[in-house]
Image (tube, helix red, strand yellow):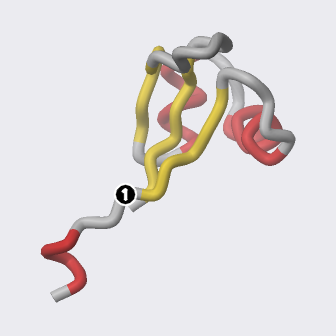
Amino acid sequence: MKLYLKVTPDEYELPVAVAENRKVLAEMVGTTPEYVSSQISKKSKGWCVVNIVDEDENK
């Protein structure tokens, strides 16, 4: 599973918004899914994707 995050642009990177897809995250923060993707691909501060591995799903 992937989680898309908008985080604080500082050393702590505290979560501001978390969603399961870029469209929902974009709606939460008032932007477009394309902008979210662009910021993540540029590795801009304040945006990231986290891959979550669920051990139970792999069995």
Residue located 56% across and 24% down the image: 6
Above or below residue 20? Residue 58 is: below
The C terminus lies in quadrant: bottom left
User: What x and y, as percent, mark residue 35?
Assistant: 78, 33
Residue at the extreme bottom? 59
9 horizontally vs 44: left or right: left
Above or below residue 16? Residue 19 is: below
User: What x and y, as percent, mark residue 10?
Assistant: 65, 11
25 horizontally vs 37: left or right: left
Residue located 13% across and 74% down the image: 56
Dot 1 alpha-carbon crowd within 10 angstroms: few under 14, some 14 to 19, many 20 or more: few
Residue located 58% across and 12% down the image: 8
Count of picture labels: 1
- Quarter of the image where one finds residue 32: top right
Say what secondary structure mark 1 lies in: loop
User: What x and y, as percent, mark residue 42?
Assistant: 86, 41
Above or below residue 5? Residue 58 is: below
Mark 1, residue position? 52
Which amino acid type is marked by label 1?
Ile
- Quarter of the image where one finds residue 30: top right
